[in-house]
Image: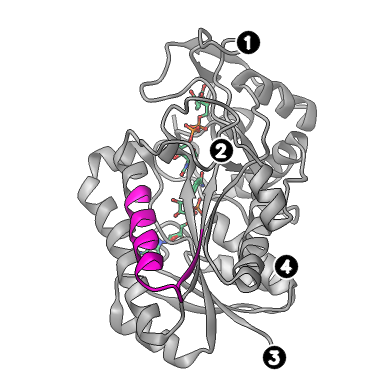
Protein backbone atom coordinates (compact mmCIF):
# COMPACT_ATOMS: atom_id res chain seq x y z
CA UNK A 1 0.00 0.00 0.00
CA UNK A 2 1.18 3.52 -0.81
CA UNK A 3 2.21 5.53 2.23
CA UNK A 4 0.54 8.86 2.85
CA UNK A 5 2.70 11.80 3.91
CA UNK A 6 1.39 15.09 5.29
CA UNK A 7 3.44 18.07 4.09
CA UNK A 8 2.86 21.23 6.10
CA UNK A 9 3.86 24.28 4.07
CA UNK A 10 3.72 22.08 0.96
CA UNK A 11 2.68 24.97 -1.30
CA UNK A 12 5.89 26.82 -0.40
CA UNK A 13 9.33 26.79 -1.98
CA UNK A 14 10.96 23.74 -0.42
CA UNK A 15 7.75 21.90 0.50
CA UNK A 16 6.48 21.94 -3.10
CA UNK A 17 9.76 20.42 -4.32
CA UNK A 18 9.51 17.76 -1.61
CA UNK A 19 5.94 17.06 -2.78
CA UNK A 20 7.26 16.39 -6.30
CA UNK A 21 9.89 13.96 -5.03
CA UNK A 22 7.39 12.14 -2.79
CA UNK A 23 4.75 11.82 -5.52
CA UNK A 24 7.38 10.64 -7.98
CA UNK A 25 8.36 8.03 -5.37
CA UNK A 26 4.73 6.85 -5.47
CA UNK A 27 3.58 8.29 -2.14
CA UNK A 28 0.21 9.90 -1.50
CA UNK A 29 0.70 13.49 -0.44
CA UNK A 30 -1.57 15.72 1.63
CA UNK A 31 -0.53 19.38 1.63
CA UNK A 32 -1.61 21.61 4.51
CA UNK A 33 -0.81 25.27 3.92
CA UNK A 34 -2.45 28.55 4.93
CA UNK A 35 -1.02 30.22 1.78
CA UNK A 36 0.47 33.10 3.79
CA UNK A 37 3.53 32.90 1.53
CA UNK A 38 2.30 30.86 -1.44
CA UNK A 39 -0.72 30.43 -3.66
CA UNK A 40 -3.07 27.61 -4.55
CA UNK A 41 -1.83 27.66 -8.17
CA UNK A 42 1.17 25.67 -6.92
CA UNK A 43 -1.10 22.66 -6.40
CA UNK A 44 -2.20 22.76 -10.06
CA UNK A 45 1.40 23.12 -11.17
CA UNK A 46 2.34 20.08 -9.06
CA UNK A 47 -0.30 18.17 -11.01
CA UNK A 48 1.28 19.29 -14.29
CA UNK A 49 4.70 18.10 -13.12
CA UNK A 50 3.64 14.80 -11.52
CA UNK A 51 0.53 13.84 -13.47
CA UNK A 52 -1.60 13.90 -10.32
CA UNK A 53 -2.28 16.54 -7.70
CA UNK A 54 -1.71 16.20 -3.98
CA UNK A 55 -4.72 16.52 -1.70
CA UNK A 56 -4.81 20.13 -0.56
CA UNK A 57 -6.08 21.52 2.74
CA UNK A 58 -6.08 25.30 3.03
CA UNK A 59 -5.48 25.82 6.75
CA UNK A 60 -3.17 26.65 9.60
CA UNK A 61 -0.95 24.32 11.62
CA UNK A 62 -2.14 26.18 14.74
CA UNK A 63 -5.72 25.01 14.15
CA UNK A 64 -5.92 21.89 16.36
CA UNK A 65 -9.44 20.93 15.29
CA UNK A 66 -8.44 21.07 11.62
CA UNK A 67 -5.34 18.97 12.28
CA UNK A 68 -7.43 16.33 14.05
CA UNK A 69 -9.73 16.23 11.03
CA UNK A 70 -6.82 15.87 8.60
CA UNK A 71 -5.34 12.96 10.60
CA UNK A 72 -8.79 11.34 10.89
CA UNK A 73 -9.46 11.61 7.14
CA UNK A 74 -6.11 10.41 5.79
CA UNK A 75 -3.99 7.35 6.71
CA UNK A 76 -0.94 9.53 7.38
CA UNK A 77 2.21 7.68 8.40
CA UNK A 78 4.66 10.59 8.60
CA UNK A 79 4.81 14.37 8.45
CA UNK A 80 7.25 16.66 6.65
CA UNK A 81 6.98 19.96 8.48
CA UNK A 82 7.95 22.98 6.37
CA UNK A 83 5.26 25.46 7.45
CA UNK A 84 6.95 28.46 8.99
CA UNK A 85 8.04 32.05 8.56
CA UNK A 86 11.61 32.44 7.40
CA UNK A 87 12.82 36.02 7.17
CA UNK A 88 15.59 36.96 9.59
CA UNK A 89 14.92 40.70 9.12
CA UNK A 90 11.15 40.36 9.61
CA UNK A 91 11.71 38.25 12.73
CA UNK A 92 13.19 41.31 14.50
CA UNK A 93 10.04 43.34 13.74
CA UNK A 94 7.49 40.56 14.35
CA UNK A 95 9.16 38.47 17.02
CA UNK A 96 5.97 37.42 18.84
CA UNK A 97 4.37 36.44 15.52
CA UNK A 98 7.43 34.37 14.55
CA UNK A 99 7.43 32.56 17.88
CA UNK A 100 3.69 31.94 17.72
CA UNK A 101 3.74 30.70 14.12
CA UNK A 102 6.96 28.69 14.17
CA UNK A 103 7.20 27.42 17.75
CA UNK A 104 3.51 27.52 18.69
CA UNK A 105 2.65 25.97 15.31
CA UNK A 106 5.14 23.15 15.80
CA UNK A 107 3.85 22.45 19.32
CA UNK A 108 0.29 22.35 18.00
CA UNK A 109 1.29 20.00 15.17
CA UNK A 110 3.13 17.51 17.38
CA UNK A 111 0.23 17.49 19.87
CA UNK A 112 -2.12 16.54 17.03
CA UNK A 113 0.34 13.90 15.80
CA UNK A 114 0.48 12.47 19.32
CA UNK A 115 -3.33 12.30 19.45
CA UNK A 116 -3.35 10.55 16.07
CA UNK A 117 -0.51 8.17 16.99
CA UNK A 118 1.70 9.45 14.16
CA UNK A 119 5.19 9.97 15.58
CA UNK A 120 7.45 10.20 12.54
CA UNK A 121 8.45 13.74 11.56
CA UNK A 122 10.96 15.44 9.27
CA UNK A 123 11.63 19.02 10.37
CA UNK A 124 13.11 22.03 8.52
CA UNK A 125 15.80 23.59 10.63
CA UNK A 126 18.39 26.03 9.44
CA UNK A 127 22.14 26.73 9.55
CA UNK A 128 21.64 30.01 11.47
CA UNK A 129 21.32 27.82 14.60
CA UNK A 130 25.14 27.52 14.35
CA UNK A 131 25.62 31.33 14.44
CA UNK A 132 29.22 32.13 13.44
CA UNK A 133 30.63 28.59 13.50
CA UNK A 134 34.03 27.95 15.11
CA UNK A 135 35.04 25.86 12.14
CA UNK A 136 34.03 25.12 8.57
CA UNK A 137 32.90 22.74 7.25
CA UNK A 138 30.50 22.80 10.21
CA UNK A 139 29.56 19.44 11.74
CA UNK A 140 26.25 18.59 13.41
CA UNK A 141 27.87 18.59 16.87
CA UNK A 142 28.94 22.27 16.56
CA UNK A 143 27.66 24.54 19.37
CA UNK A 144 24.18 25.98 18.86
CA UNK A 145 24.09 29.77 19.39
CA UNK A 146 21.79 31.60 17.10
CA UNK A 147 21.81 35.40 16.98
CA UNK A 148 18.35 36.39 15.75
CA UNK A 149 14.69 35.65 16.60
CA UNK A 150 14.15 33.54 13.47
CA UNK A 151 17.10 31.30 14.33
CA UNK A 152 15.93 31.21 17.95
CA UNK A 153 12.48 30.04 16.81
CA UNK A 154 14.14 27.16 14.91
CA UNK A 155 16.25 26.25 17.91
CA UNK A 156 13.19 26.26 20.18
CA UNK A 157 11.39 23.93 17.75
CA UNK A 158 14.44 21.65 17.76
CA UNK A 159 14.33 21.64 21.58
CA UNK A 160 10.63 20.70 21.58
CA UNK A 161 11.34 17.86 19.15
CA UNK A 162 14.39 16.62 21.09
CA UNK A 163 12.37 16.69 24.31
CA UNK A 164 9.60 14.59 22.76
CA UNK A 165 12.09 11.92 21.71
CA UNK A 166 13.68 11.83 25.16
CA UNK A 167 10.28 11.45 26.83
CA UNK A 168 8.90 8.84 24.42
CA UNK A 169 11.16 6.63 22.30
CA UNK A 170 8.33 6.01 19.85
CA UNK A 171 8.98 9.48 18.40
CA UNK A 172 11.31 9.50 15.39
CA UNK A 173 12.33 12.97 14.29
CA UNK A 174 14.79 13.95 11.56
CA UNK A 175 16.10 17.45 12.29
CA UNK A 176 17.43 18.64 8.93
CA UNK A 177 19.68 21.69 8.97
CA UNK A 178 19.53 23.39 5.60
CA UNK A 179 22.28 25.66 4.45
CA UNK A 180 21.26 28.04 1.62
CA UNK A 181 18.54 26.54 -0.61
CA UNK A 182 18.33 28.12 -4.08
CA UNK A 183 17.32 27.21 -7.63
CA UNK A 184 13.95 25.89 -8.75
CA UNK A 185 12.41 22.88 -10.43
CA UNK A 186 13.82 22.38 -13.94
CA UNK A 187 10.27 22.57 -15.37
CA UNK A 188 10.17 26.27 -14.41
CA UNK A 189 6.75 25.64 -12.84
CA UNK A 190 7.60 25.92 -9.14
CA UNK A 191 10.15 28.03 -7.30
CA UNK A 192 10.56 30.55 -4.51
CA UNK A 193 7.91 33.21 -4.04
CA UNK A 194 9.60 36.56 -3.55
CA UNK A 195 7.80 39.01 -1.33
CA UNK A 196 8.69 41.98 0.84
CA UNK A 197 12.26 43.20 1.14
CA UNK A 198 14.69 40.87 -0.61
CA UNK A 199 17.53 39.81 1.66
CA UNK A 200 18.94 36.66 0.15
CA UNK A 201 21.66 36.70 -2.45
CA UNK A 202 20.34 34.48 -5.27
CA UNK A 203 16.91 36.16 -5.47
CA UNK A 204 18.66 39.53 -5.51
CA UNK A 205 20.94 38.41 -8.33
CA UNK A 206 17.97 37.24 -10.40
CA UNK A 207 16.27 40.59 -9.78
CA UNK A 208 19.37 42.45 -10.97
CA UNK A 209 19.39 40.23 -14.06
CA UNK A 210 15.72 41.13 -14.59
CA UNK A 211 16.63 44.86 -14.37
CA UNK A 212 14.55 45.31 -11.22
CA UNK A 213 17.66 46.54 -9.41
CA UNK A 214 20.56 48.38 -11.09
CA UNK A 215 23.33 46.37 -9.44
CA UNK A 216 24.11 43.72 -6.86
CA UNK A 217 25.05 45.12 -3.48
CA UNK A 218 27.99 43.07 -2.25
CA UNK A 219 27.91 43.33 1.52
CA UNK A 220 31.58 43.46 2.43
CA UNK A 221 34.77 42.46 0.62
CA UNK A 222 36.96 42.49 3.70
CA UNK A 223 36.03 39.12 5.23
CA UNK A 224 38.86 36.69 6.00
CA UNK A 225 37.90 34.59 2.96
CA UNK A 226 39.84 33.95 -0.26
CA UNK A 227 38.31 36.93 -2.13
CA UNK A 228 37.05 38.90 0.88
CA UNK A 229 33.33 38.25 0.25
CA UNK A 230 31.07 36.00 2.36
CA UNK A 231 31.11 32.26 1.69
CA UNK A 232 27.76 30.47 2.23
CA UNK A 233 26.84 26.95 1.10
CA UNK A 234 24.26 27.08 -1.71
CA UNK A 235 22.28 23.92 -2.28
CA UNK A 236 19.86 23.22 -5.13
CA UNK A 237 16.31 22.89 -3.81
CA UNK A 238 15.80 19.65 -5.78
CA UNK A 239 18.82 18.10 -4.05
CA UNK A 240 17.43 19.34 -0.74
CA UNK A 241 14.03 17.78 -1.47
CA UNK A 242 15.71 14.45 -2.26
CA UNK A 243 17.48 14.69 1.11
CA UNK A 244 14.05 14.68 2.77
CA UNK A 245 13.13 11.39 1.15
CA UNK A 246 16.43 9.93 2.28
CA UNK A 247 15.73 11.14 5.83
CA UNK A 248 12.25 9.65 5.80
CA UNK A 249 13.64 6.30 4.65
CA UNK A 250 16.29 6.45 7.36
CA UNK A 251 13.67 7.05 10.09
CA UNK A 252 11.73 4.01 8.91
CA UNK A 253 14.82 1.80 8.72
CA UNK A 254 16.74 2.99 11.79
CA UNK A 255 13.65 3.42 13.96
CA UNK A 256 15.16 6.44 15.68
CA UNK A 257 15.70 10.12 15.08
CA UNK A 258 18.66 11.89 13.51
CA UNK A 259 20.05 15.41 13.27
CA UNK A 260 21.79 16.02 9.99
CA UNK A 261 23.07 18.89 7.84
CA UNK A 262 21.89 19.19 4.26
CA UNK A 263 24.47 21.23 2.37
CA UNK A 264 26.94 20.66 -0.44
CA UNK A 265 30.05 20.88 1.73
CA UNK A 266 31.61 23.60 -0.41
CA UNK A 267 31.24 27.29 0.06
CA UNK A 268 30.65 29.61 -2.86
CA UNK A 269 31.58 33.26 -2.34
CA UNK A 270 29.23 36.12 -3.17
CA UNK A 271 31.33 37.18 -6.15
CA UNK A 272 31.75 33.59 -7.35
CA UNK A 273 27.96 33.20 -7.40
CA UNK A 274 27.54 36.38 -9.45
CA UNK A 275 30.14 35.15 -11.96
CA UNK A 276 28.60 31.66 -12.09
CA UNK A 277 25.19 33.24 -12.78
CA UNK A 278 26.58 35.10 -15.78
CA UNK A 279 28.32 31.97 -17.05
CA UNK A 280 25.11 29.94 -16.73
CA UNK A 281 22.71 32.49 -18.19
CA UNK A 282 24.76 34.94 -20.26
CA UNK A 283 23.30 37.84 -18.25
CA UNK A 284 25.88 40.21 -16.73
CA UNK A 285 25.53 41.12 -13.04
CA UNK A 286 26.99 44.55 -12.26
CA UNK A 287 27.87 45.01 -8.60
CA UNK A 288 29.01 47.55 -6.04
CA UNK A 289 30.76 46.77 -2.78
CA UNK A 290 28.98 48.10 0.32
CA UNK A 291 29.87 47.75 4.01
CA UNK A 292 29.26 44.40 5.72
CA UNK A 293 25.64 43.57 6.62
CA UNK A 294 25.01 43.26 10.37
CA UNK A 295 24.75 39.66 11.53
CA UNK A 296 26.48 38.09 8.50
CA UNK A 297 29.24 35.54 8.98
CA UNK A 298 32.42 35.14 6.95
CA UNK A 299 31.96 31.48 6.02
CA UNK A 300 29.36 28.87 6.83
CA UNK A 301 29.36 25.62 4.93
CA UNK A 302 28.30 22.17 5.83
CA UNK A 303 30.12 19.02 6.85
CA UNK A 304 28.54 16.30 4.72
CA UNK A 305 29.94 13.07 6.19
CA UNK A 306 26.88 12.21 8.26
CA UNK A 307 24.40 12.87 5.45
CA UNK A 308 26.39 10.48 3.26
CA UNK A 309 27.02 7.75 5.83
CA UNK A 310 23.60 7.79 7.52
CA UNK A 311 21.27 8.80 4.69
CA UNK A 312 23.32 7.76 1.67
CA UNK A 313 22.61 11.25 0.34
CA UNK A 314 24.83 13.88 -1.19
CA UNK A 315 24.04 16.97 -3.23
CA UNK A 316 24.49 16.40 -6.97
CA UNK A 317 23.49 19.57 -8.79
CA UNK A 318 26.04 22.23 -9.76
CA UNK A 319 26.13 25.93 -9.00
CA UNK A 320 25.49 26.51 -12.72
CA UNK A 321 22.29 24.43 -12.51
CA UNK A 322 21.21 26.44 -9.44
CA UNK A 323 21.71 29.68 -11.40
CA UNK A 324 20.09 28.48 -14.63
CA UNK A 325 17.04 27.10 -12.79
CA UNK A 326 16.66 30.20 -10.59
CA UNK A 327 16.78 32.35 -13.75
CA UNK A 328 14.25 30.18 -15.62
CA UNK A 329 11.88 30.54 -12.66
CA UNK A 330 12.42 34.31 -12.46
CA UNK A 331 11.73 34.65 -16.19
CA UNK A 332 8.48 32.70 -15.79
CA UNK A 333 7.42 35.13 -13.03
CA UNK A 334 8.31 38.36 -14.82
CA UNK A 335 4.85 39.01 -16.23
CA UNK A 336 3.30 38.35 -12.79
CA UNK A 337 5.32 40.82 -10.72
CA UNK A 338 5.09 44.58 -11.16
CA UNK A 339 8.38 46.45 -11.49
CA UNK A 340 9.43 48.25 -8.32
CA UNK A 341 12.22 50.66 -7.53
P1 LIG B 1 8.13 29.25 2.12
O1 LIG B 1 7.66 30.51 2.76
O2 LIG B 1 8.27 29.24 0.65
O3 LIG B 1 7.18 28.03 2.52
C1 LIG B 1 6.59 27.94 3.77
C2 LIG B 1 5.12 27.62 3.55
O4 LIG B 1 4.50 27.48 4.84
C3 LIG B 1 4.37 28.71 2.80
O5 LIG B 1 3.66 28.14 1.73
C4 LIG B 1 3.43 29.31 3.83
O6 LIG B 1 2.22 29.75 3.25
C5 LIG B 1 3.24 28.15 4.81
N1 LIG B 1 2.94 28.51 6.18
C6 LIG B 1 3.61 29.38 6.99
N2 LIG B 1 3.04 29.40 8.20
C7 LIG B 1 2.01 28.52 8.19
C8 LIG B 1 1.06 28.10 9.14
N3 LIG B 1 1.02 28.62 10.37
N4 LIG B 1 0.16 27.16 8.79
C9 LIG B 1 0.16 26.64 7.54
N5 LIG B 1 1.04 27.00 6.58
C10 LIG B 1 1.95 27.94 6.91
O7 LIG B 1 9.49 28.85 2.82
P2 LIG B 1 10.56 27.76 2.39
O8 LIG B 1 11.75 28.45 1.86
O9 LIG B 1 9.91 26.70 1.59
O10 LIG B 1 10.96 27.19 3.83
C11 LIG B 1 10.33 26.04 4.35
C12 LIG B 1 10.90 25.78 5.73
O11 LIG B 1 12.29 25.62 5.64
C13 LIG B 1 10.63 26.91 6.72
O12 LIG B 1 10.32 26.34 7.96
C14 LIG B 1 11.95 27.64 6.78
O13 LIG B 1 12.16 28.24 8.03
C15 LIG B 1 12.94 26.50 6.55
N6 LIG B 1 14.21 26.94 5.96
C16 LIG B 1 14.20 27.66 4.80
C17 LIG B 1 15.40 28.09 4.25
C18 LIG B 1 15.43 28.93 3.00
O14 LIG B 1 16.44 29.61 2.76
N7 LIG B 1 14.40 28.91 2.17
C19 LIG B 1 16.60 27.75 4.87
C20 LIG B 1 16.57 27.00 6.04
C21 LIG B 1 15.36 26.58 6.58
C1 LIG C 1 24.59 35.12 1.75
C2 LIG C 1 25.78 36.03 1.54
C3 LIG C 1 25.57 38.25 2.42
C4 LIG C 1 22.41 39.58 -0.30
C5 LIG C 1 19.91 33.25 4.89
C6 LIG C 1 19.13 33.29 6.15
C7 LIG C 1 19.03 31.94 6.74
C8 LIG C 1 18.55 30.88 5.78
C9 LIG C 1 19.31 30.94 4.52
C10 LIG C 1 16.21 30.47 6.18
C11 LIG C 1 26.12 36.88 2.77
C12 LIG C 1 25.69 38.27 0.92
C13 LIG C 1 23.37 38.82 0.36
C14 LIG C 1 22.84 40.68 -1.09
C15 LIG C 1 25.12 40.18 -0.53
N1 LIG C 1 17.14 31.04 5.48
N2 LIG C 1 24.68 39.11 0.24
N3 LIG C 1 24.19 40.94 -1.17
O1 LIG C 1 22.50 35.11 5.27
O2 LIG C 1 23.67 32.96 4.59
O3 LIG C 1 21.27 32.91 5.14
O4 LIG C 1 19.35 32.29 4.02
O5 LIG C 1 16.34 29.68 7.07
O6 LIG C 1 18.15 32.03 7.79
O7 LIG C 1 19.81 34.17 7.03
O8 LIG C 1 22.02 34.02 3.04
O9 LIG C 1 21.70 34.81 0.75
O10 LIG C 1 21.11 36.37 2.67
O11 LIG C 1 23.49 35.88 2.22
O12 LIG C 1 26.33 40.47 -0.62
O13 LIG C 1 22.04 41.42 -1.68
O14 LIG C 1 25.46 36.95 0.51
O15 LIG C 1 26.29 39.32 2.98
O16 LIG C 1 27.52 36.94 2.84
P1 LIG C 1 22.44 33.81 4.58
P2 LIG C 1 22.00 35.30 2.13
Tell me if 93 is positioned left or right of 195 in this view. left
Q: Quadrant of residue 279?
A: top right
First in sequence, mark 4 or 2: give its number: 4
Above or below, 142 against 80 in this view is above
From the top left corner, tell me how far across and down residue 301 is, in percent. 59, 32
Instruction: Label the magenta part by its dominant secondary structure.
Output: helix
Q: Are marks 3 and 1 in contact (CB under 8 Å)?
A: no
Disc marking residue 49:
4
Please identify, in this view, whether the residue under mark 3 or under mark 1 is nearer the observer: 3
Please tell me how crowded label 4 is: few (under 14), some (14-19), or many (20+) other residues with Cα within 10 Å.
Answer: some
Residue nearest the viewer, comparing 89 with 194:
89
Q: Which residue is mark 3?
A: 1
Q: Which residues are magenta?
A: 154-174
Q: Nearer the viewer, mark 4 or mark 1?
A: 1
13, above or below 285, in the image? below
Identify the image's colour scheme: rainbow, by chain, secondary structure or one colour. Answer: one colour
Distance from the alpha carbon under mark 4 to that under mark 2? 35 Å
Foreground mark, 4 or 2, reads 2
Secondary structure beneath label 4: helix
Q: Which residue is mark 2?
A: 139
Amino acid sequence: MKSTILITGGAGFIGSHAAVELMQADCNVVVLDNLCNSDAGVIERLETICGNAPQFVNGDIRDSALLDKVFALHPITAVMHFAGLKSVGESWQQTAHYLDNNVGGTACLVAAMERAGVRRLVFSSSAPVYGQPDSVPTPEFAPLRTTNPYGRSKLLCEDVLRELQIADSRWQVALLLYFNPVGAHASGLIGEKLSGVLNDLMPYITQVAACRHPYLRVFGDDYPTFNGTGVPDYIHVVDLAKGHLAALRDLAQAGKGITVNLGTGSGVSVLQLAVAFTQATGVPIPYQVLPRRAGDVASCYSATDLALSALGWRAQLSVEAMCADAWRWECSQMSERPLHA
